[in-house]
Amino acid sequence: MKFSFTWLELLLVTSVAAIFLALAQILLLHSFPLLTNQDTTSTNQRQLDCFLLMLKTGSIQAGYALGDDAEPIQVSSDEVVLLADLNRDGDLNDT
């Protein structure tokens, strides 16, 4: 007994495989930008965390009292303002 496939069977299998590969390619191409966007967001978050840690370390080394009732660091959407007690009289209006 000799088993062989007809041209019609080969054509049918090939077309089904081509449709499956085309759908897989579309799904992969659609999900790739989502993955790169997530990676970019993660990178930006790490950079912001690193900046805030350096800002905290620098402010502690510069002598800003982070535990007092006064708020020596004022953060807004446009700027970061560091208030200083330059003459050591207890107020932060010296900046």
Image (cartoon, rainbow, N blue to C red):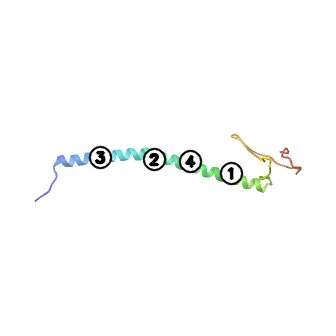
Amino acid identity at mark 4: Thr
Q: Nearer the viewer, mark 1 or mark 3?
A: 1
Distance of mark 2 from mark 4, alpha carbons? 14 Å
Nearest to N terminus: mark 3 or mark 2: 3
Residue highlighted by disc 3: 18
Q: Is residue 10 left or right of residue 49?
A: left
Rendered-image quadrant of the C terminus: top right
Give residue 59's position: percent from left, percent from top.
Answer: 76, 53
Residue at image point 80% right, 49% down: 69
Nearest to N terminus: mark 2 or mark 4: 2
Residue highlighted by disc 1: 52
Residue highlighted by disc 4: 41
Residue at image point 80% right, 54% down: 63
Rendered-image quadrant of the N terminus: bottom left
Amino acid identity at mark 2: Phe
Distance of mark 4 from mark 3, alpha carbons? 35 Å
Q: Are marks 2 and 4 in contact (CB under 8 Å)?
A: no
* Residue furthest left as drawn: 1
Amino acid identity at mark 1: Leu
- SS for callout 4: helix
Q: Is residue 91 left or right of residue 57?
A: right
Instruction: Please tell me the numbered disc located at residue 17.
Output: none
Nearest to N terminus: mark 1 or mark 3: 3
Residue at image point 68% right, 54% down: 53
- SS for callout 1: helix
Residue highlighted by disc 2: 32
Q: Are marks 3 and 2 in contact (CB under 8 Å)?
A: no
- SS for callout 2: helix
